[in-house]
Image (cartoon, rainbow, N blue to C red):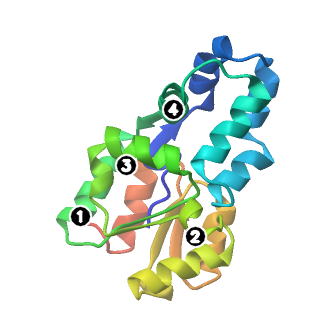
Amino acid sequence: MFDLGKVLLDFDYGIALRRLLPLVQAPLADLHRLINQSPLLFEYETGRIATAEFYERVRAATQFQGTFELFRDVFGDIFTEIAPMVALHADLRARGCPTYVLSNTNELAIQHIRRRFPFFAHFDAYVLSFEHRAMKPDPALYAVLERLTGLHAGDLFYLDDRPENVAAGQARGWRGVVHHDPELTRRALLEAGLLNQ
């Protein structure tokens, strides 16, 4: 299982903030809190509110002077591919290893990723927080992946950049590694027998 952000895709909310700033009536600090660290984003990424409500609440709070389509494109376009990790995923697929995405994310981000990054189509299944009303490290989201795959405990190997998320998988018996460096992660998968030299 792969996390998305900081594992397969780097992201920077600053890109969206800089593009949104000329179109809103809010200071940068307020816009940053609203888009990146707020309860509003948590509600959106846990599926408690839909995209339309998220947009309307951002628009009302910032007096955004643009269309929904513009907001969608700016908000989603914050990702860059981490090429060595995408290559590692391709190597796993070539070896016949099933792969899955387990991610805290939102609908606008996933729509953008599907349009922009072809590798994203090549997973066996996706467990996305906004579709299941739970965010890692909530055990409920991990249980969804187990039900979906029929795999449990040592059958699963999890890559995530956040230690608490990997620890939640390990508490269920999953194998896993906290991802910081593509070469170290590749070595961990070699040692686990999931890749060939």
- Mark 3 lies on residue: 85
Counting residues from the start of the chain, the first of labels 3 and 4 encountered is 4
- Mark 4 lies on residue: 78
Residue 156, quarter of picture:
bottom left
Dots 3 and 1: beta carbons under 8 Å? Answer: no
Mark 2 packing: few (<14 Cα in 10 Å), some, or many (20+)?
some
Amino acid type at circle 4 is Ile
Rendered view: 100 above or below 68: below
Rendered view: 10 above or below 173: above
Q: CA distance from mark 3 to mark 4?
A: 18 Å
Mark 1 packing: few (<14 Cα in 10 Å), some, or many (20+)?
some
Amino acid type at circle 3 is Met
Residue drawn at the location 59% of the way across and 73% of the way down: 141
Res 132 label? 2
- Is disc 3 placed on a helix, strand or loop? helix
Most foreground residue, 195 or 16? 16
- Mark 1 lies on residue: 93
Q: CA distance from mark 2 to mark 1?
A: 26 Å
Counting residues from the start of the chain, the first of labels 2 and 3 encountered is 3
Dots 1 and 4: beta carbons under 8 Å? Answer: no
Q: CA distance from mark 2 to mark 3?
A: 26 Å
Counting residues from the start of the chain, the first of labels 1 and 4 encountered is 4
